[in-house]
Amino acid sequence: FNGGDAIAATETLTKEIRLAESIFLGLRLVDGFRVTDIEEKFHCDLRKRYELVIERLSAGNLLEADKVWRLTDRGRLVADAVMSEFV
């Protein structure tokens, strides 16, 4: 440390990045996440915002998207690809 600051750099995350990261973290949980929790936190309608993504992932049996969004067993096998759809 040499008496200096231990922080080498900082990064300011935009609302969009924070939203995407919240979705990523939630989908990594086996039980997924409650949609209303993220909608309230970010003041947005996830179903409307990601309507086409949800339809595509649900049709491919990769995502269960109801009150709780969670990856299916198949979706967990390709989790990174699924999550990239939300960026």
Image: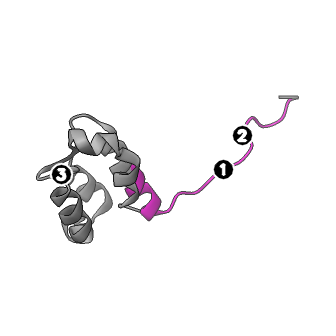
Q: Dot 3: what SS?
A: loop
Neighbour class for label 1 at 10 Å: few (<14), some, many (≥20)? few
Quadrant location of the C terminus in the rendered image? bottom left
Dot placed on the residue nearer the N-terminal end, 2 or 3: 2
Q: Main secondary structure of the magenta part?
A: loop
- In this view, the residue farthest toward the left is 66
Residue under pointer 1: 10
Q: Residue at 33%, 51% (x, y): give it.
A: 23
Q: Amino acid at mark 2?
A: Ile
Which one is nearer the viewer's eye here, 16 or 56?
56
Residue at the disc numbered 3 = 61
On residue 7, the disc is 2
Residue in the image at 36% along x and 61% along y: 85
- The alpha-carbon separation of the residues under discs 1 and 2 comes to 7 Å
Picture quadrant of residue 46: bottom left
Residues at circles 1 and 2 in contact by the CB criterion of under 8 Å: yes
The image position of residue 17, as x and y in percent, is 46, 59
Q: Please state the extent of the stretch shown in magenta in the rendering.
A: 3-21
Instruction: Name above or below for residue 74 compared with residue 18.
Output: above
